[in-house]
Image (cartoon, rainbow, N blue to C red):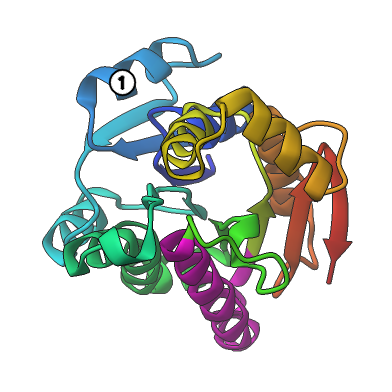
Amino acid sequence: MKVAVITGSSKGIGSFIAKDLNKKKIKVILIARSKKLLKRVQQNLPYPKLSHIISKDLRSLSACNLVGKKVKKINYLINVAGATKGGHFLKLDDETWNDGFNLKFKSALRLSKIFWPKLKKSRGKIINIGGGAGSWEKPSRTFMIGGAVNTALNHFTKTLSLQGKLDKVSVSIINPGMTLTGRLEKLLKADSKILKKSVKQLLKERTKLAKIKRPTKPEEVAKLTLKLIKDKKSNGKVLSIDGGKIKSLN
């Protein structure tokens, strides 16, 4: 039986990925801080018995190490966890910057390293979920931390894929654009206070600026993740999904 470890799977994109993989009878190990939310996701899986939950805050190395000890077998590591905060540059303190990197970038880095020997043994895959904010072509002054973290995650993925080529471990990344999750709503609410615009107006403006008809749906990111799992030549791939349509594949 194949086993997938999915971080940040208590809601949003992570929960949709868990559901899609579980539907294929892949055992999913769900990781997030909230045990209550994890149990809710677990109960709604097609095959709840083919799942296990681990309630841990992945911001620390010790938590990542504990997860590594609990998981005996792994075929797929899917790093989704991440909640970088937006805001005005002068109001983003050092702790907020550290928080953004610790949860999204460092947890992906640490878990990749911890699970590498087991992934090498299973000839498994690492799929990182980054974000469109990592593109230097369309930076946002109110989402500076997210942009920096996703840029770092893209670079890490590409360079790790070089090691993956030697060790037969596939490493790739998906960069969703605006995605209809609760997190997007939070970011828009924060930006509306800074930019003095309504959430509805901001969503309309950003959809137009991105030249898309609508934001991406989390289930579309999940389907793309499943496609990467099936892809025998996925190592080193960087996929961008925006408005329900893949714009780049390399």
Camera-side residue of 207 and 76:
207
Q: Residue drawn at (49%, 76%), measured in percent from left and top?
A: 152
Residue receiving disc 1: 37
Q: At which x and y percent is residue 178?
A: 66, 42
Q: At which x and y percent is residue 121?
A: 48, 69
Q: Residue drawn at (45%, 31%), measured in percent from left and top?
A: 189
Range drawn in magenta: 144-172
Q: Is residue 102 visible?
A: no
Q: At which x and y percent is residue 167?
A: 56, 83
Up the image or down, 52 lies above or below 238; here it is: above
Give the main secondary structure of the magenta stretch: helix
**Does residue 159 appear to the left or right of 183 in the view shown?**
right
Q: Residue furthest left?
A: 62
Indicate the amino acid at tag 1. Answer: Leu
In magenta stretch: residue 202: no
Camera-side residue of 96 and 241:
96
Quarter of the rendering containing residue 113: bottom left
Up the image or down, 141 lies above or below 156; here it is: above
Please state, as top left, top right, bottom left or bottom right, where the C terminus lies in the image. Answer: bottom right
Q: Residue furthest front?
A: 196
Q: Residue drawn at (38%, 47%), measured in percent from left and top?
A: 83
Q: Is residue 125 visible?
A: yes
Badge 1 marks a residue whose secondary structure is helix
**Does residue 5 appear to the left or right of 215 in the view shown?**
left
